[in-house]
Image (cartoon, rainbow, N blue to C red):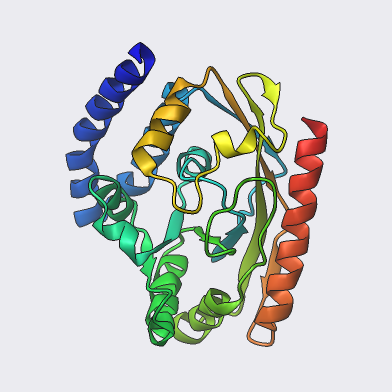
Amino acid sequence: MLRVVAVSVAFAAITFTLIPVQWVAVALKLPLRRKLPVFYHRMLCKLLRVRITVVGEPCRDAPLLIASNHVSWLDIPVLTALAPVVFVAKREVASWPLFGLLAKLQRSVFVERERRSRTAKTNRDIAVRLAEGDPVVLFAEETSSDGNRVLPFRSSLIGALHATMRERGAAQVHVQPLAIAYARVDGIPAGRQHRPLVAWYGGMDLLPHLAGVMRRSAIDVTVAWGPALPCDLATDRKALAASLEATVRRLRADALQQS
């Protein structure tokens, strides 16, 4: 419990110090609005004793959409610690105490998945972020898993690619597959029984799970980048989603095997 309290105090101190700075940076569209979340999430990873191994390299071309599997809320600090990315999140996240504010300050795009009629607006919002040069992370499973599998990738929000090209005049958009694999927990290779210690899925309550992660002595995660795919208006989104899913499955399996 002493560690949980110490990490909680440090988290609060860092968070409430940087919130007003980020708010001003976002309001004035300062370059700092992209740099500060990277610094912040690197600090969080250090507090939580998360050690990140990177395989491959992120694409440097823009616009860039990143299609990733999704295991836990921990994916957010892990990925942001590596690059100034923007996330696509479910609408209810925006109303969460504190965490909703943090998501807004990172300029997340919120999607109402139960209202497919809103998909066009979501695609336009993603298109704006992409056109401004922000790499956008799409958790293509549209939910988190138990960490032992990759769920089927959904093709609906990949329609944002076409929206970007039509509305922003981009000839093509690059899509890069990304696999997140939690390889070790407390120094032990993360088998099927260990990955749910990090995974946050189903009806799990956030705060007890957060406290559980704080108690861990170390969490090792591998982030594996696949080759980016250039896409244009002729790209079939269902075929693209299937290709991305297959690549992420392979990257994740390779990362776990090598850990």
Q: Is residue 113 visible?
A: yes
**Quarter of the image containing the N terminus?**
top left
Q: Against 129, is 253 above or below?
A: above
Q: Who's the residue at 35% across and 20% down the image?
A: 4
Q: Is residue 100 left or right of residue 85?
A: left
Question: Residue 32 location in percent, x, y?
Answer: 31, 44
Question: Residue 3 location in percent, x, y?
Answer: 38, 15
Question: Residue 57 location in percent, x, y?
Answer: 68, 45
Q: Is residue 26 left or right of residue 131?
A: left
Q: Who's the residue at 76% across and 69% down the image?
A: 243
Q: Against 231, is 9 above or below?
A: above
Q: Nearer the viewer, residue 186 or 69?
A: 186
Q: Nearer the viewer, residue 219 or 239?
A: 219
Q: Who's the residue at 74% across and 47% down the image?
A: 252
**Quarter of the image containing the C terminus?**
top right
Q: Is residue 227 left or right of residue 44?
A: right
Question: Residue 154 location in percent, x, y?
Answer: 61, 72
Q: Is residue 144 left or right of residue 43?
A: right
Q: Against 99, is 66 above or below?
A: below
Q: Who's the residue at 41% across and 66% down the image?
A: 129
Q: Is residue 62 visible?
A: no
Q: How many marks?
A: 0
Using the rendered view, name the quadrant where residue 27 is placed: bottom left
Q: Against 46, is 82 above or below?
A: below
Q: Nearer the viewer, residue 114 or 111?
A: 114
